[in-house]
Image: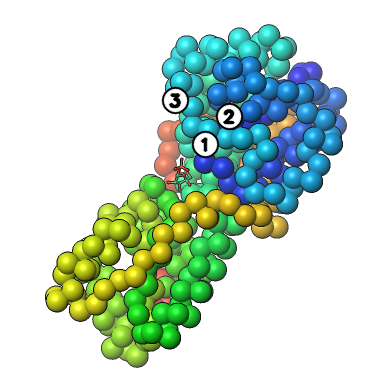
Amino acid sequence: MKSIAVLTSGGDAPGMNAAIRAVVRTGIAKGWEVYGVQHGYYGLMSGDMQIMGQRDVGGIVQQGGTVLGSARALEFKTVEGRQKALRELNKRGIEGLVVIGGNGSQTGAYALSEMGFPVVGIASTIDNDLYGSEMTIGVDTALNIALEAIDRLKITASSHQRAFLLEVMGRDCGYLALMAGIAGGAEFISIPEIPTEPEDIARELHAAYERGKKHGIIVVAEGAKYNANALVAYFKEHKAELGFELRATILGHIQRGGAPTAFDRLLATRLGAAATSALARGEYGVLVGMNKSAMTTTALSVVVANKKTVDFALIELQKELDG
Ligand code: F6P
């Protein structure tokens, strides 16, 4: 192998830059040329890729986002789109591709590898919903941002004896909401995996108030049965029965920005190095992830066929911890 390419795809995640840097530098150390592809699969299809040198990735380990740019490219889902990409790769003599991204991106990576091209994926999404890696790039940073928001809300909630609701990201997966809620001592956590009714939340908060609590913090994942806006509207409409209104903060994309934590930089660096090692030993069509603290590979066919869920025991733990 003489030449590889690297791209970032899907929602950006803090730590992606550290992964790019590791792929570029460990690739160069192996004697390869490393192309950086702009804007995910779009750049792959349009041929927007440039050879990167050691210095091109200098000073990025501490930056959030991705210097290569990212996108959700619908055209890559088509065979024609992928054929375009293959033509661009072959034209340049590129023999391997590293795809840094989450579920949608790894589905694309799998489709390309099924067409015979050597691809290795790197597990990266703030949602932590990708099968094949216990932790994905960006989760730790996003979690700490959500936690800071909870800590701040708790202070003002206590001052006013109010109920506050924080909505965090997670379209299909409640990992961020669950972990941030436990770490922040929330009174109620609502996630997509367990549909909850507004009445359940009201009951829990009333009980907490009876026990002498001065605040009520509810953490909701954006993909929960009732998201923040729906809950605020419901509580307003049913104030007479439910007894109080909710004030909501939607954290949104704030969770995806910001400098990566030490954990995310280290995870991304190790995964980047593991990806070029996999390509060097001819192990293709796999996702590199971290399991039991070690770098592992899982076939992309297995990754895309499975769904990672939250640890349901932690939901029970949260209920016991709510004093
Ligand atoms: O997959 C990561 C994620 O941040 C999800 O939590 C969220 O639902 C989605 O991306 C938002 O995507 P976009 O930035 O394209 O609106």
From the image, which quarter does the N terminus lie in? top right
Decide if ligand 1 comes within 8 Å of the CB at mark 3.
Answer: no
Cα distance in 3D space between marks 1 and 3? 11 Å
Q: Are marks 3 and 2 in contact (CB under 8 Å)?
A: no
The residue carrying pointer 1 sits among few (fewer than 14), some (14 to 19) or many (20 or more) residues within 10 Å by Cα, namely many
Badge 3 or badge 2: first in the primary sequence = 2
The residue depicted at 54 percent of the width and 45 percent of the height is 125
Residue at the spot 72% in from the left edge and 12% down from the top edge: 93
Residue with the mark numbered 1: 10
Q: Type of residue at label 3?
A: Leu
Determine the secondary structure under disc 2. Answer: loop
For residue 92, what is the image quadrant? top right
**Residue plotted at (36% across, 85% down):** 161
Mark drawn on residue 74: 3
Q: Amino acid at mark 2?
A: Gly
Q: Is mark 1 within 8 Å of ligand 1?
A: yes
Work out whether residue 244 or residue 202 is closer to the camera in this orientation and state it: 244
Residue type, numbered disc 1: Gly
Relative side of 37 to 155, left or right = right
Residue 68 position (above or below residue 5):
below
Kindly identify which residue carries mark 2.
40
Left or right of 313: which side holds 145?
right
Q: Quadrant of the C terminus?
A: bottom left
Label 2 and label 1: CA atoms lie apart by 8 Å
Dot 2 and dot 1 residues touching (CB under 8 Å) = yes
Q: In 3D space, how far apart are the residues under numbered discs 3 and 2 (Cα atoms)?
A: 11 Å
Q: Secondary structure under badge 3?
A: helix
The residue nearer to you, when weighing 127 against 160, is 160
Q: Is residue 112 left or right of residue 6?
A: left
**Where is residue 99 shown, x and y percent of the image?**
61, 31
